[in-house]
Amino acid sequence: MFQGLRKNAKIVIYIVAAVFILSMAIGGISSIFTSHPYLAKIAGEEITYSEYNEMLKNSYANYVQQNPDTEITDQVIKQINDETWNQLVGKILYDKEIKRRKIKVTEDDILDKLRNPAQDITSIPDFQTDGKFDYDKYESLLLENPDFANYLEERYVQSLPYEKLFESVKSEVNVTEAEVKEDFINKNNKADAQIIFFDPAKIDSVSVSQEEIEKYYKDHKEDYRKEPSCQIKYIKIPLAPSEEDKNIAKTKADSVYTIVMAGMDFAAAAMEYSEGPSAPKGGDLGYFTQGRMVKEFSDKAFSMNVNEISEPVLTQFGWHIIKVTDKRTNEAGELEVKASHILISTEASDQTRENLAIVAADVYDKAVDNGIDAAGETYAYEVTESREFNENSSYIGGIGQQPSLVKFAFDNKVGSVSSPFELNNGDFIIAEVSEKLGVHYQELSEVETRIKSLLEKEKKVEAVHQKAESFKASISGNDLLAEAAAAGWEILEAEDITIDKSLPKIRKETELNKAILELGENEYTNLIKGQNGSYIAYVTRRVEPDLAVFEQTKENLLKEAQIEAENVHLNEWYMDLKDSAKIEDYRSDYYSL
């Protein structure tokens, strides 16, 4: 029992109002060109590649153990890496905050935890009698089994500092009865209404002059302010399997095909020889429709008979030996094939990678001597110029997550050429800083179309409001809805309108909602001019908040509001803590992210 408990128990502490797991981690391949002595620096604490990779391997092992039937795709690998990173950042920041706040765990704290076990302990069947937690059984094991007692004590020594930290942060929030009452009123003060929508889209056209555009740009120039930025020109040298690599893979695929055709069980062969993620499942890919797989694979599979095995088929992923195990028609009437495969990857060999590194070095030398344009022309590589990126960017269009390259651009002058950067997929990048700008503003030509559209919308909103005023002035009776419909204006139905509700098609118009909620049933609002049009609403139903219900439920409402406010505050506190910490993340130099 204790072994099962030790295996399944988790140290539960909040990380941004969620579960924080102390174990972390997944492995990757270090770039031979990385210029950093560490993989990350978090609030002054350096994390080496080997340290992080060990965490990552642990996380990967935990994931596989907990999800034995889940295919480990690139997306899952990235997810595990990101989760490990977030856990690491959180732990370092929390540990520093625990130290700063001088939070200590006392013997009394641990004893209190032992006397009041958490739900994951009380729910263990061995500690229950007739389906309920039996404290005597739990206490007996504590007294009789030193391993169990030591385990729980160590668990609380590790988790309690975080629990006390989070309780300290949450104690900074205090929700008052007045706040809860106001929220209750806002949520329960409701109305249904029919709304005459004077839609700006019904205004055929408006004209915006160049002078108006220029004036708006001048008056709102700060809206187009941009922080210091850089641009780079770069050459991407792609990694691809050589012909020799392809031939070696084909030879292996042919050998496996021969073994299978000689009688080896296909699933066993897939588990032994396949290099694809479905290998542990005997190569089983399940059912799929035409076009779901890459074309070469799909075309071959759909041309085969059930239980037929194909000769090796080449796709961008390598050589596939396919076995069709079933065919059926799905509910949509589409033909589906169920197939298994053995994948022999056509990956670039170490020799091919070494050769590419030599080529990258040659291109780099040429770029240093003659500039990147000349290097591209000499070696017949395309030279691409990136968009602007700022110092806080981690992503460069066309390249991806490359914080190291961003840092290089900001640390060096125009014309400087970077040493080759190896990307996660094995490609190499040689970059030249092509432009550096301080604080600057987008040119009018860059934002002219956007400004014109904005001014056109403003003019249409104003024009439709004038039409709405004329319409209202022309109506002598009280049946505005019928008159509006006859005049071609749309009547919208809205239910359960509250002060904060966003209404269909109209979106959020607070002044309209407010005007509706100030009325009783069978009353019209005045003409309301909003950001997205003009409106007249007719209230068809009103529900006033029942303050007697509030009095009956306010204790629970206060408790729920306090918990919600604490979690929101905890989340905001952590975001602020993270934003204020200096974090250098160079994982993309080592892993595919």
Image: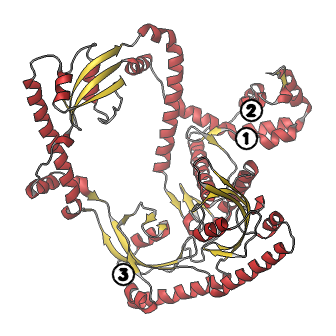
Return the mark for residue 10: 1
Q: Position of residue 142 (x, y in %)?
A: 86, 30
Q: Residue at x 33, y 19 (%)?
A: 191
Circle 3 Cα neighbour tier, 10 Å, few/some/many (<14 / 14–19 / ≥20): some
Q: Please, is residue 474 above or below residue 15 in the view?
A: above
Look at mark 3 in the image and give the residue it sits on: 415
Q: Amino acid at mark 3?
A: Gly
Mark 3 and mark 2 residues within 8 Å of each other at the beta carbon: no
Q: Position of residue 370 (x, y in %)?
A: 39, 91
Q: Secondary structure at mark 2?
A: helix
Q: Earlier in the sequence, mark 3 or mark 1?
A: 1
| Left or right of residue 376, residue 221 in this image | left
Look at mark 2 in the image and give the residue it sits on: 120
Return the mark for residue 68: none
Q: Residue at x 48, y 87 (%)?
A: 363
Q: Amino acid at mark 1?
A: Lys
